[in-house]
Image (cartoon, grey):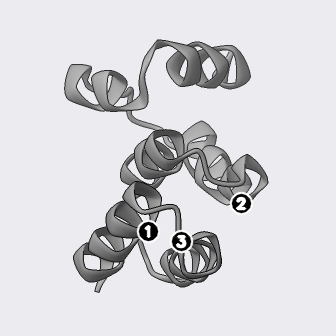
């Protein structure tokens, strides 16, 4: 599950176990995760941002505006990039 892999990711980041950390990131990437949550996870653990392209595309194609909690989860940097791309 997403939460199980997040636990692995957190522990491997804390103890600097790079190979397992990379495997956890790969496993997370294959799971269906809400695009905003995925971006927040990738930002928190400084994972490969190129893997987020489908998440950003999904948010750019979204018809409804983002809510305040969504923008807070994205962070200012990511929200600014997303807003520019949506315009």
Label 1 to label 2: alpha-carbon separation: 19 Å
Q: Residues within 10 Å of mark 1 (few under 14, many from 20)?
A: some
Q: How many marks?
A: 3
Q: As displayed, is residue 33 above or below residue 72?
A: below
Can you identify the residue that label 1 sits on? Answer: 12
Q: Which mark is residue 51?
A: 2
Estimate the x, y position of residue 58 in percent, counting from the top left.
58, 52
Can you identify the residue that label 3 sits on? Answer: 17
Label 3 to label 2: alpha-carbon separation: 21 Å
Instruction: Confirm or deny contact between disc 1 and disc 3 (CB under 8 A).
Output: yes
Q: As displayed, is residue 60 above or below residue 41?
A: above
Residue 10 lies in what quarter of the image? bottom left
48 relative to 37 in the view: left or right: right
Label 1 to label 3: alpha-carbon separation: 5 Å
Residue visible at 63% across and 44% down? 56
Chain-order first, disc 3 or disc 2: 3
Estimate the x, y position of residue 21 in percent, counting from the top left.
54, 72
Quadrant containing the N terminus is bottom left
């Amino acid at each position: 599950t997403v939460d199980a892999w997040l636990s692995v990711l957190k522990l491997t980041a804390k103890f600097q176990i790079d190979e397992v950390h990379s495997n956890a990131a790969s496993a997370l990437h294959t799971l269906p995760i809400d695009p905003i949550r995925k971006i927040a996870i990738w930002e928190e653990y400084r994972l490969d941002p190129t893997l987020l392209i489908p998440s950003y595309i999904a948010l750019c194609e979204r018809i409804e505006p983002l809510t305040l909690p969504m923008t807070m989860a994205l962070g200012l940097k990511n929200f600014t990039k997303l807003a520019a791309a949506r315009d």
